[in-house]
Image (spheres, rainbow, N blue to C red):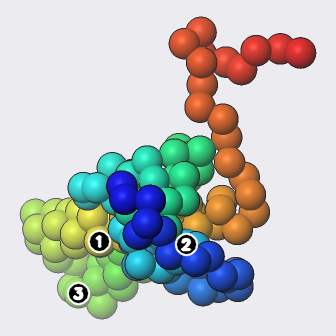
């Protein structure tokens, strides 16, 4: 990264940073990308240099994605079952499995970006674990 390319940092309100994270952008500057690939976080924002590595979402994006996809797909399954004249199981599988996978793939990076932005707004950064797996005790 070129040190002269670092942009000035201005204060960001909560919802703006969450929206930036949802879009896969840095929660601080809104310009740099959070992800190097589909879900792989960059270690630093390429635009403002914000250290992104300490903001670790862990399993939260997966939980929120399952929660959201379940709340979209399950009512549709139940409504289809009730008003669809008892459709066969293969039709359920044909409809809901691809829909669930597509929704999960669409939502997961967005939710992960929003979680990273939420962690950044709350200053919930975690130090990088040591080689022994934990921070040294004082
Ligand atoms: Zn940035």
Query: Does residue 125 lie above or below 17 as drawn?
Result: above
Residue 118 lies in what quarter of the image?
Answer: bottom right
Q: Residue at x 67, y 18 (%)?
A: 134
* Callout 1: CB less than 8 Å from ligand 1: no
Secondary-structure class at tag 3: loop
Q: Residue at x 60, y 25 (%)?
A: 129
* Label 2 packing within 10 angstroms: few (<14), some (14-19), many (20+): many
Q: How far apart, in angstroms, are the residues tagged by discs 1 and 3?
A: 27 Å
Q: Position of residue 84 (x, y in %)?
A: 23, 87
In terms of sequence position, does the residue under pointer 2 or pointer 1 come before the other? 2
Return the residue at label 3. Answer: 84
Query: Does residue 10 lie above or below 126 as drawn?
Result: below
Q: Is residue 108 left or right of residue 119?
A: left
Q: Is residue 95 left or right of residue 83?
A: left
* Callout 2: CB less than 8 Å from ligand 1: yes
Task: Identify which residue, 44 or 60, lies in the foreground.
Answer: 44
Return the residue at label 1. Answer: 106
Task: Identify which residue, 16 or 50, lies in the foreground.
Answer: 50
Kindly identify which numbered label has been placed on residue 88: none
Q: How far apart, in angstroms, are the residues tagged by discs 2 and 3?
A: 44 Å
* Label 3 packing within 10 angstroms: few (<14), some (14-19), many (20+): few
Residues under numbered marks 2 and 1 in contact, where contact means CB atoms less than 8 Å apart: no
Kindly identify which numbered label has been placed on residue 27: 2
Query: Does residue 26 lie above or below 37 as drawn?
Result: below
Q: Position of residue 22 (x, y in %)?
A: 46, 76
Asked whether residue 117 is in view, the answer is yes
Q: Residue at x 59, y 9 (%)?
A: 132
Secondary-structure class at tag 1: helix
Task: Identify which residue, 114 or 33, lies in the foreground.
Answer: 33
Asked whether residue 68 is in view, the answer is no
Query: Does residue 53 lie above or below 78 as drawn?
Result: above
In terms of sequence position, does the residue under pointer 1 or pointer 3 come before the other? 3
């Amino acid at each position: 990264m070129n040190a002269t390319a670092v942009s000035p940092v201005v204060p960001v309100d909560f919802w703006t940073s969450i929206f930036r994270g949802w879009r896969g952008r840095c929660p601080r500057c809104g310009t740099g990308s959070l992800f190097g690939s589909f879900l792989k976080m960059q270690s630093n924002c390429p635009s403002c240099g914000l250290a992104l590595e300490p903001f670790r979402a862990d399993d939260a994006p997966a939980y929120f994605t399952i929660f959201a996809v379940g709340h979209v797909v399950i009512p549709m399954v139940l409504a289809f079952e009730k008003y669809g004249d008892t459709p066969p199981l293969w039709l359920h599988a044909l409809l809901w499995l691809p829909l669930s996978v597509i929704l999960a793939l669409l939502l997961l990076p967005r939710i992960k970006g929003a979680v990273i932005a939420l962690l950044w707004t709350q200053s919930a950064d975690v130090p990088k674990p040591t080689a022994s797996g934990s921070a040294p005790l004082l």
